[in-house]
Amino acid sequence: MQWTILRNLAIGVAAFAICGIAGAQVIADPWEGMRIDAVRIVLANSPDAPSEAAAFEERARGVLDLYPGTSFRNLFLDWGLGKLRSQPWVEDARADLAPGNVDGIIVTVAVTLADKANANARAAPLPFPLLYQSADSLIKFKLMTAGLGYANQNAWYGQPAAFVGANPLASKPSGAGWASWVEGAAELGIQGIGPIAPSVYVYGSLSYMLSGSAGQEVFTNEPRSYGGIEDAYVGIVFGNTWQDGSRLVCNLSAGRQPFQIADGMLIRITAGNGFDRAALQLNPRWAADNLFLADARYNTLRVQAFRLDPDELPQIDSRTIIDGLNVYGGLGSALPWGLTYLHVPQSSYGYYTPTAVGTRAGLNVFDARLSWLPTLPGGTGPYGKAELGYQTNDANSFPMRAWGGYAEAGYTLGDLPWRPTLSYRLSYFTGDNPATTTYERWDPLLSGGTPEEWVQGINHYKIFQDSNVIAQRFQAKLQPSPTIEVVPQVWLFGADQTNNLGGTLSQLAGTKLGWEVNVTGKYYPTRNLYFQGGLAATFPLSGVRGAVDGNLNRWVSAVLLARVSY
């Protein structure tokens, strides 16, 4: 029995480490799935009369069909731009994207009005990457290429054997001194949307992705490459708008596609990267193996019902299935809220106590979210956010009762240079107390994203994911220009319990884990081009130092990323 527990624990640690690092610093697409904070219409050749200009802006907004509070999707923005360009009163329409005050995006659409004398005669060429466009249809290429360079000094605090020595996937991990590697990915596909009946549209996407790595990364120095289907989904969207302005939109979809809930505390990383698939830090793959999603929005209320099968790495595939019901309320208002219920009918992902092994199968999750966003995008003022989750599982030999959540408060100083947004977040994810018969360790599910989302520390996250962790984050978001964002962070990490079975260190010497300082720079010269760079330094504290034999050194990392996408 004891050997079985140790063997399963080693496999569980491998899954924890690989899944924990995937998506730990960069997002392959910095915009897809983010909340739309504002949609701004700018007339390049605005009429002199304010009332006439306002009328054109409202007409453009209605044709574009994007609204604050909804999730951003590139395909639907391209579709809206195509519909705008087909209007006889529009010469051209282009979009730019920029980060909002907190964690959303601002969509700015520049509309050039057509000359009335030439409106019916113009035939502008299709902009790249469009293949076909009509008044209500669109076919386009989906193209992406990205490259990343990465370097670590003293990965795993210079003692890889202490942290990943039992990990069967860590064949030749980096450690003391400097080590560097490069990663790349390319995706080619086709996407489209068009009508099949009045106010009923079908859409879909099919793409193939190649990825590769070379050099000394955190787990191995073996060059790798991989190719496989990324997108493969179809959907149907329909709805109605009534004379009083009420609006219903229903969207049904199925297939290989990404998915997230809110800012990703529960579900964000729906595909595995790294190991045989390469591109561990670039994290280019996001599509789940399968997602059945029914999504309906009526005015400011949105309801989602889904079944999610994440695309896990084959070597550590837990065959997890997640069924869920997700509700968003107050969309586009100053008080958006959310409720989520998840159930896991199938999974071999392990829960470990000193004497028994359980699984994720049977897990139930109840989650509630509330935000206070009174400040307009680009303005000055405060904000607040909070989320609380509760997990239960009575399908194992030991009952599970775990808690997780956070509270965040911040303030945007929109009148100052660089428009800083300063914030503090306290997050708490319970650990298991071995003195009780109840299992209390929080299951991180598919949590992840960027350091502004649910990667808690650029380096530290590789050792401690969102379980048995108390994290304090001090953050500033600075915008020297609309296309540049700089995000420095300071983190302080602690543990809820010294028992850490299921993590990279099974027993801690205390609850003080470490602290980290990092900075990320982002440059968005156009909607289709993205650059990112980052530096991080992480320092172990007594709870980790006392649990490892030998000296632990400061862990430093640096990353540079370039991405082109259409």
Image (spheres, rainbow, N blue to C red):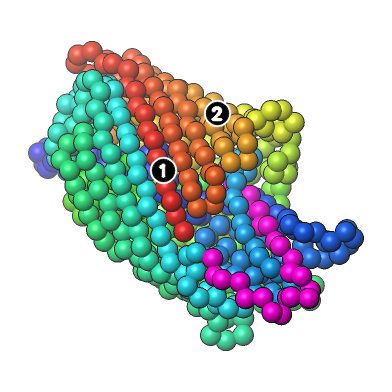
Q: Quadrant of residue 280?
A: top left
Asked which secondary structure carries label 2, the reply is strand
Earlier in the chain: of badge 1 and badge 2, it is 2
**Relative to residue 143, is residue 478 drawn left or right?**
right
Which residue is drawn at the image coordinates 71% and 62% (left, top)? 112
- Percent coordinates x, y for residue 462 in the rendering: 32, 33
- Percent coordinates x, y for residue 419 in the rendering: 67, 32
Which residue is drawn at the image coordinates 50% and 75% (left, top)? 132
The verdict on residue 126 being magenta is yes
Bounds of the magenta segment: 103-127
Instruction: Look at the image and tell me whether residue 472 can be seen.
Output: no
> Identity of the amino acid at label 2?
Gln
Q: Nearer the viewer, residue 413 or 341?
A: 413
**Relative to residue 553, is residue 340 drawn left or right?**
right
Q: Quadrant of residue 534?
A: top left
Q: Quadrant of residue 429?
A: top left
Query: Label for residue 416?
Result: none
Which residue is drawn at the image coordinates 53% and 85% (left, top)? 196
Disc 2 target residue: 475
Prevailing secondary structure class for the magenta stretch in the rendered image: loop
- Percent coordinates x, y for residue 300 in the rendering: 68, 60
Disc 1 target residue: 562
The verdict on residue 523 being magenta is no
> Identity of the amino acid at label 1?
Ala
Q: Nearer the viewer, mark 1 or mark 2?
A: 1
Tell me, yes or no, whether the two marked residues, 1 and 2, touch with CB atoms within 8 Å.
no
Instruction: Look at the image and tell me whether residue 242 can be seen.
Output: yes
- Graded by Cα atoms within 10 Å as few (under 14), some (14 to 19) or many (20 or more), the crowding at tag 1 reads some
Asked which secondary structure carries label 1, the reply is strand
Quadrant where the N terminus sits is top left
* Disc 1 from disc 2: Cα separation: 24 Å
